[in-house]
Image (cartoon, rainbow, N blue to C red):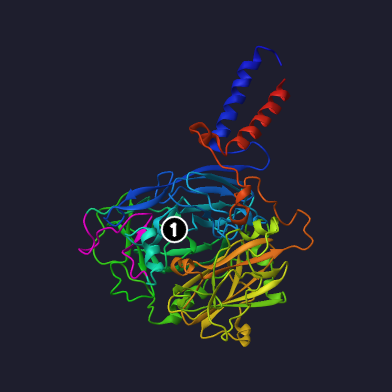
């Protein structure tokens, strides 16, 4: 290369390097996205009352994580709260890598004024998810945000490309912050009725005189005739919500990473922790704006009328403001069969590809022999040793001081017990315990969620999706297997279980690690309604489970291994970016050498 050409070509290369660094994308064969999250308190008034909320990078809700299948994701989390913090990513399966799961049984918390970088790859997955803080009831104050995993370019989506995308974070909300709500539960009381429902961190539009003046509400601007993909996540504490857009059809297309058979609904029940995608076409005449509504379900709706989130859908050619009564749900919760039938209508789109170029329906789960059955029964909270606790199979879980997989790695004895019962036993009183499931790698299991509590529960299993094959009222018995959908059941990670009812799911234990099983209803989870599933490959060869990360935090019996963090202003900026800078420099030097 001529010497005169070098500066100009090097300038171009430097520009490419700088752009790649700022955009967070690698020039290497395995691309990645990189985020810095500063989690802190801010003051907001979503329901007209100033209160402390948890923001990410100053935003409530937090920013979008937007990635693509096979991307590596790095999230450098700085904890500016006054208490420990963990972020978790429900539904994002963390293949072979429970070290990054962000729950107390698998990770030591990030202490105040410390940071930790999560590092994981999105393998064989697409869809709509979200993240949130998993400790100390913090989700009740915010800290959540959307997480999208896109198809690779070579994998078609099973519908025309939408003209745009819109995310909705909906959830019940209290004007007291998470520490005050924790104190209520610690005192042995229930939380009672929420103060409202938020849509994207904002309160209700003033649709009648019951809504105070001056509340900021969500407005979504759309163009007539266009079709948008609407992603909806229920990030609330414990209230099931009915979502609807006045005069518009919701075409269901995806839930938690699986494409569904495409079915139109006028409204849809979204339970705590669940995520859905709909296609919505702006096909109205725009005589006025339209209501976006998220209202409480399975409660006395007359009493709970004020617990309603209302936003506005605004066409660019709208002729006036929305007015009049809100649209009502099409199903009556006093007829439980009708609401259960909505869930039963969700089927897998067996002709669509998922994250890989093979049909989702090619996995014939209904033809696999079930090797183990687990029945997880939830009951109303009860007093154990004088404190109100929630249980699963009679056990109220106590998180170990040393996380389970870390205890395994360092052979810490007595951190937990592998004796969680595979079904409820009525001959033992409820108890506190660190009991987890000793599951067998590559088993194909049946899990029955039996809800003998008085409220709808949402159950979630980290690290996995499962086939929802049946649900019904009453108590599950073996003869109910004859009613299972063994052909096109939807696969997902969070499923509702109605009070006095059961839900059956099937799953293959092919993801090594320690994975949390919990109720997503935050009050019950906080009171102990969870456990873990420990799955170890006895022939581990380094290919079925990731090694402990080099930046692992230490606590409990291993606290002495932790090296204190010391941050200057400069190191805070650079922390978590050094590996990115180094890899990009290596690529840049290689390109320069090639030119020379």
The answer to whether 320 is drawn above or below residue 186 in the figure is: above
* Residue sitting nearer the eye, 180 or 317: 180
Q: Name the residue under label 1.
A: 139
Q: In which quarter of the image is the N terminus?
A: top right
Q: What x and y, as percent, mark residue 165? A: 46, 51
Report if residue 76 is visible in the image. Answer: no
* Residue sitting nearer the eye, 469 or 549: 549
Q: In this view, does 101 lie to the left or right of 85?
A: right
Q: What x and y, as percent, mark residue 482? A: 63, 84
Q: What x and y, as percent, mark residue 276? A: 49, 62
Report if residue 402 is visible in the image. Answer: yes
Q: For numbered disc 1, what is the local secondary structure?
A: helix
Main SS of residues in magenta: loop
The answer to whether 430 is drawn above or below residue 184 in the figure is: below
Rendered residue at 42%/56% (across/down) = 168
Rendered residue at 62%/25% (across/down) = 13
Q: Quadrant of the C terminus?
A: top right
Q: Is residue 169 left or right of residue 394?
A: left
Q: What x and y, as percent, mark residue 387? A: 44, 73
Q: Which residue lies furthest to the top in this view?
A: 4
Query: Label 1 neighbourhood size at 10 Å, few (<14), some (14-19), many (20+)?
Result: many
Q: How many labels does the image show?
A: 1
596 drawn magenta: no
Q: What stretch is highlighted in magenta?
A: 191-213
The answer to whether 592 is drawn above or below residue 577 in the figure is: above
193 drawn magenta: yes
């Amino acid at each position: 290369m001529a010497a005169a050409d070098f500066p100009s070509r090097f300038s171009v290369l430097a520009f490419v390097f700088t752009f790649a660094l700022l955009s967070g994308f690698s020039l290497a064969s395995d691309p990645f996205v990189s985020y810095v999250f500063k989690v802190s308190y801010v003051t907001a008034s979503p329901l007209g009352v100033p209160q402390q909320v948890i923001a990410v990078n100053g935003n409530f809700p937090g920013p979008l994580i937007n990635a693509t299948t096979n991307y590596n994701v790095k999230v450098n989390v700085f904890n500016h709260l006054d208490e420990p913090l963990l972020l978790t990513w429900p539904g994002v399966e963390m293949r072979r890598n429970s070290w990054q799961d962000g729950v107390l049984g698998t990770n030591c918390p990030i202490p105040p004024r410390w940071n930790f970088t999560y590092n994981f790859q999105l393998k064989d997955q697409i869809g709509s998810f979200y993240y949130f803080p998993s400790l100390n009831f913090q989700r009740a104050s915010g800290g959540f945000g959307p997480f999208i995993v896109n198809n690779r370019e070579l994998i078609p989506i099973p519908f025309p490309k939408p003209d745009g995308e819109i995310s909705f974070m909906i959830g019940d909300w209290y004007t007291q912050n998470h520490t005050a709500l924790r104190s209520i539960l610690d005192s042995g009381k229930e939380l009672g009725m929420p103060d409202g429902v938020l849509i994207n961190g904002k309160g209700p539009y003033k649709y009648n005189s019951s809504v105070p003046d001056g509340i900021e509400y969500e407005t979504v601007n759309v163009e007539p005739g266009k079709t948008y993909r609407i992603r909806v996540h229920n990030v609330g504490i414990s209230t099931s919500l009915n979502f609807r857009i006045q005069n518009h059809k919701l075409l269901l297309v995806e839930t938690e990473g699986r494409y569904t058979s495409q079915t139109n609904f006028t409204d849809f029940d979204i339970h705590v922790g669940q995520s859905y995608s709909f296609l919505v076409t702006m096909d109205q005449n725009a005589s006025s704006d339209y209501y976006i509504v998220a209202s409480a379900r399975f409660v006395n709706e007359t009493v709970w009328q004020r617990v309603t989130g209302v936003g506005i859908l605004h066409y660019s050619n709208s002729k006036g403001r929305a007015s009049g009564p809100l649209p009502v749900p099409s199903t009556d919760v006093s007829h439980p069969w009708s609401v259960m039938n909505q869930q039963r209508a969700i089927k897998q789109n067996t002709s669509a590809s998922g994250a890989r170029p093979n049909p989702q329906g090619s996995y014939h789960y209904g033809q696999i022999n079930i090797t183990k059955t687990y029945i997880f029964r939830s009951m109303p909270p009860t007093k154990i040793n004088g404190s109100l606790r929630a249980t699963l199979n009679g056990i109220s879980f106590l998180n170990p001081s040393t996380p389970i997989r870390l205890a395994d790695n360092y052979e810490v004895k007595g951190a937990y017990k592998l004796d969680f019962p595979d079904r409820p036993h009525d001959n033992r009183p409820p108890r506190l315990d660190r009991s987890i499931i000793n599951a067998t790698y590559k088993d194909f299991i049946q899990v029955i969620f039996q809800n003998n509590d008085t409220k709808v529960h949402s159950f979630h299993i980290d690290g996995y999706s499962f086939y929802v094959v049946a649900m019904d009222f009453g108590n599950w018995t073996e003869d109910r297997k004859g009613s299972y959908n063994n052909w096109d059941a939807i696969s997902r990670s969070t499923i509702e279980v109605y009070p006095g009812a059961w839900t059956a799911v099937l799953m293959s234990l092919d993801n090594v690690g320690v994975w949390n099983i919990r109720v997503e209803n935050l009050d019950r989870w906080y009171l102990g309604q969870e456990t873990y599933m420990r799955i170890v490959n006895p022939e581990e060869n380094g290919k079925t489970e990731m090694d402990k990360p080099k930046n692992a935090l230490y606590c409990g019996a291993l606290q002495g291994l932790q090296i204190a963090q010391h941050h200057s202003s400069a190191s805070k900026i650079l922390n978590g970016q050094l590996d990115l800078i180094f890899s990009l420099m290596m690529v840049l030097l290689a390109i320069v050498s090639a030119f020379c």
